Amino acid sequence: MTNDRTPYSPEEQIKVDEFLAGATLFLGPDPEIMRDHKSAARTPLEEELLSRPIDSDALDKVRKRIVAGLDEAYEMMEQTGAAPGAKWGDLTSAVYSAGGDLVHISSGGVLAFASVLHYPVRFINKYWAQEPSVGIHDGDAFIHNDARYGNIHCTDQSIIIPVFHEGELIAWVATVVHEGENGAKEPGGMPSSSESAFDDGLRMPPFKIFERGVLRRDLLTFLQNSVREPKLQYQDLKVKYYAALRIKERVLAVIDEVGRDAFIVSMRKSLEDVEAEARRRVSLIPDGTYRVNLWSDSTLRENVLLKYPCAITIRGDQMIIDWRGAAPQFLNRAFNSTLGTSKCGMNQGILAFLWPDLPRGISVMNSIEVLTDTGSCLDPTDDAPLGQSLQGAFKAFATTQALWSKLTFSCQEKFGAIIAPWFNQINTFLFGGITQHQEFVGNVCADLNGMGGGARAYRDGEHSMAPFFAAMADIGEQEIIEEDVPFMQLISKKIKRDNQGFGKFRGGMGYEMALAAKDTPFWGFAAVSSGSKFPATPGLFGGYGCPTLPLAKIKGVNVFEQMKNSPENWQFDFERLLNEQPLPGAKYSTHHMGMALELANEGDIFMMCQGSGGGYGDVLERDPAEVMADVEAGYISSTTAREIYFCVFDADTLAVDSRATEAARNAERRARLERGRPYAEFVEDWVTEAPPQTVPYYGSWGDDNSTIHATAWAATGPIKLALPMSQMPPIMLPDPKDLAIAGLQAENEALRAAASRGDA
Amino acid sequence: MRFVPMTEYLQIDLETERWQCRRCGREIASARENYKTGLLVFDRDPREIHRPLIDPQRYEFTFSPDPQWCRIVEFYCPGCGTMVEVEYLPPGHPPTYDMEIDIDALRAQKAGLDDDAVIPLGRDLPVNFSTQAHSNWTGER
C-alpha cells in the first residue's frame, strides 16, 4: 500500500500542529524532552551576543555570584528544612538558562540533580508557556516531583521559578529537597512494595503552585491531603520557595551589575566551556571499550538475580555508555529506574569521581551517548512502578564508577583518584507511624549516608564516609533524632567487624544498626536494600568486594524490659546477639534487605549493617602492620588476619612475625600457581550456555546482549525465556506471600492425603 | 613511552604489543586481546573469603554470598602468583573482557611521552606516591 496523501503546505502544517497540540488528551512525559540529556544549541540571541567581544571578568563574576547564591540557598534549606533529607544535605539548588539548560548547581548536596532538573523546565517552556490557562509570569513558581517528567526519584520535590528581567524571561532557578513522605503505598516515599505506578505516591508533573507571588492554597491543600505529613508538605514548600527567591535575588543583582547581555553570555559560555573541557578530558582516555558486569540480587520483594552490564567505548572525544543487556523492567516491582534517573547515576559517577573539579552543569554530558534497551529496568516504560528506582540508578552509578579507574589508570592528567567502587546500596531503615508528639510521620534514617568509601590506589577507604551521591551529607546526631521519633538505636555507629572489602588497601567499612521502637501506639520499619546473596560492591585490580549483608530481627520480647530487668543479657554486638541468642524467649531470624513496612511491637529489634567499599589490589601486598592495626581496632578478626591476609602474629601482643608472614604469603602465591588453571581450560569447563536453572535470572548472559534471559510467570507457573528485549512479555511476579501460602497448602494437602491413607 | 601502565598489575609494552605483569615482568597476552587469556584462573567458593559471621546452621543470611548464586573468580599472574583481578560472577557466566584497548590509538596517544614519565594515581597525594610508567621490577619477588 502506498501513502498517496497530499503533503500539507507549510501553512497547513502549522494549523495541523496547532490543532493537534490543542487537542492532545494528556500531556504525559514527552520522549522528545525526556530522552535528551544534552544542552540545547545556541539560540539566535546567544549566537549574536557571542559574536561580540566578551568581557571575561564579567563572565567570571557572574559564575561566582551565581554559585555563591546557590550555596547560600543550599545553606538556607539545610538549616530550615523540616524533612530529614533536608537536614542532612539531600538537596540542591540550580540556575538555568531561559531555555532550560541547567548551568550551575550548589557545591554541596546531591550532584546527580545536575543531570535531571532540566527536564521539567523544558516541559514548562514547551507546554505551559503558551497555554492560556497556565502561562509563565513573574512571581510564578512551579512544583514537581514525578521522575517520569525528570527527577532522581519521586520522593524529591522541586520548586522552579522563572526569572524575568525587564519583562524578558532570562533564566530559571530551582530548589529541590528529598522530602521523604509523598503519600506512597508505604510511609517515607520510597516503597519497596510498590506494585504499580500508582503505588508510588504523588505524581506531580510541573504545575504552578504560586501564581504571580500568591500561593495557590487550593492546590497546596490537595497536596497536603495526599500525603501523611501535611505540615511537612507546607513547611518545606515554603523553605524551597524562599530559598529559590533568594537565588532569584542574586541572579537579578548580578544582572544589574554586569548587564543583561553579559549574563546571557556567561550562562552560555559556562555551558560551552564545560563541554569543551569534558571533551578534552575524554580525549585523554585511551580509545577502546571497557566493560563491567554487576548484579543485584533482589527486587526488594524476593531474591532474583538482575544483571547490570556496562560497556564504555571511547573514541577521541566521544564516550558511549552502553547498558544494553540489563534486566527487563518488572511491571509489579519497584526497582525500575527511568532513563533520566539512570543517567543521574551515570552523571553522579562523573561529577563525584571522574571529574570532581568540573563545574556541575548539564553540558558535562554533551560528549556522552547512552545506549539502552527500551523496556529494560534502566529504561522502563511509563507504567512501570518506580518506588525504589534508586536500585536501578545506584547500579547505573556503580557500573560507571567501577570502570573509571580502568579508563584512566594510564592517564598522566587525572582529576579524581584511582579508587575502588564505593558502596552503592541503601542500607538503613525507613520508618512510619505515630511519634511521641502524636504526629504521623514517614521517612528514612540518616544512616543511609554512612556508606563505606572505596579503597584508593595509595590508601585505605574511609569508614562510613558519605553516600556516593553527596560527599558532604551528614549521618545525623542520634540523640537529636530521638527527640523527633519514637525509636532508639541500641547499637549505633559501631563498625561491623569483618565487614570489609579486603585488599592491599582495604575498603572503608560500614557500621551496625539495631533499632527498637518505644512509647508509640503505632510504628513500623522498612528496608530497601539488596546484596544479601550477591555482594553489592566489587573490588578493583585484585581487591575483593564487600560481603553480603543480612537484615536481622529479634522479636517476641521487649528489649527495653530485658535491659531493665536483666541488663547483663544485652550485647552491643550484631554477631553476638545472633550467635549467642542471649534474650530468653526471643525469636531470631535473618532476611534479605527488602522489607515492606513491618509493624514493630515495643522492643522488637531490627538490625542491619552499612556496607563497605571495595578493596584495592592483592591482599598479599597489604602491610602487615596495617592488618594488625585493624585487628587491634576491632575492624577485622584474627581469623581474617590469618586466613585472608596471611599474617603470622602473636595472638596476645599482635606482634607480627615478619619472616613467617612473608613465608606464608609466598606459600600462598605458590598455591595460587598450583590451583589456578590456564584461562582457556578454565573457560572450557566453567562457561555455560545459559544461567543456572535454579537461579531466577534476568538479563543477558555473557557478552551477547541481544538475548535477555528471564523467568516469566504464566498461569501454569514460572517459564524460562531467552528473547530479544523487544519481544519480552511483561514480567510480573506473584506475591511472595501467595507463593508461601500455595506451598503450605500443598504441604497441608499432602499431609491430609497421607493421613487419609493411614500412613504412619 | 614504551611501557604503559594500565592497571595496578598490568602494563602494555607498545613495542611487543604484549600485556605484561608489572610485578614480575611476565608476558601475559597479546595487547590486542583480553589479558585474562594469559592468566591463571580459580573458581573460589565465596564463603572462603566472606566467611559466615553468624551461624549458617541457624540463619539463612549470614554475611556470606550464596555459592549457588555467586562465585569469586580469581585471576593470577602465571609468573609470580599476584592476584591481578577478581570478578564476582554467577556460576557459569563468562569472565568479562574488561579492557579492549585500541593499541594503535594508544601508541599515537603516548608517542612523545618519556618512559620515566610519572603517572599520578590521584590528586590528593604527594607525587612520590605516583606510579612510574615503567615498573621498577628487578626480577625478584
Image (spheres, grey):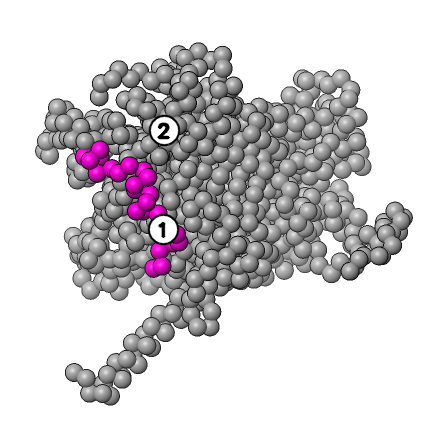
Residue A432 position, x and y percent, is 44, 58
Residue A78 position, x and y percent, is 51, 39
- Nearer to me, A301 or A462: A301
Callout 2: 10 Å neighbours few (<14), some, many (20+)? some
Q: Is residue A631 visible?
A: no
Check disc 1 and give the amino acid type. Answer: Thr
Q: Quadrant of the N terminus of chain A?
A: bottom right
The tag on residue A688 is: 1
**Quarter of image, res B121:** top left
Q: Secondary structure at mark 1?
A: loop
Vertical placement of residue A598 versus A39, above or below: below
Residue A213 position, x and y percent, is 72, 45
Callout 1: 10 Å neighbours few (<14), some, many (20+)? some
Vertical placement of residue A296 versus A634, above or below: below
Q: Is residue A685 magenta?
A: yes
Question: Disc 2 and disc 1: Cα gap in Å?
Answer: 24 Å
Horizontally, residue B40 falls left or right of residue A705, namely left
In this figure, which residue is indicated by the disc labeled 2? B29
The residue at the point 88 percent across, 47 percent down is A10
Q: Quadrant of the C terminus of chain A?
A: bottom left
Residues in magenta, as a range? A671-694
The tag on residue B116 is: none
Q: Is residue A6 visible?
A: yes
> On the same chain: label 2 and label 1?
no
Horizontally, residue A533 falls left or right of residue A328, namely left
Vertical placement of residue A384 versus A447, above or below: below
Provide the chain ID for the residue under circle 2: B
Q: Secondary structure at mark 2?
A: strand
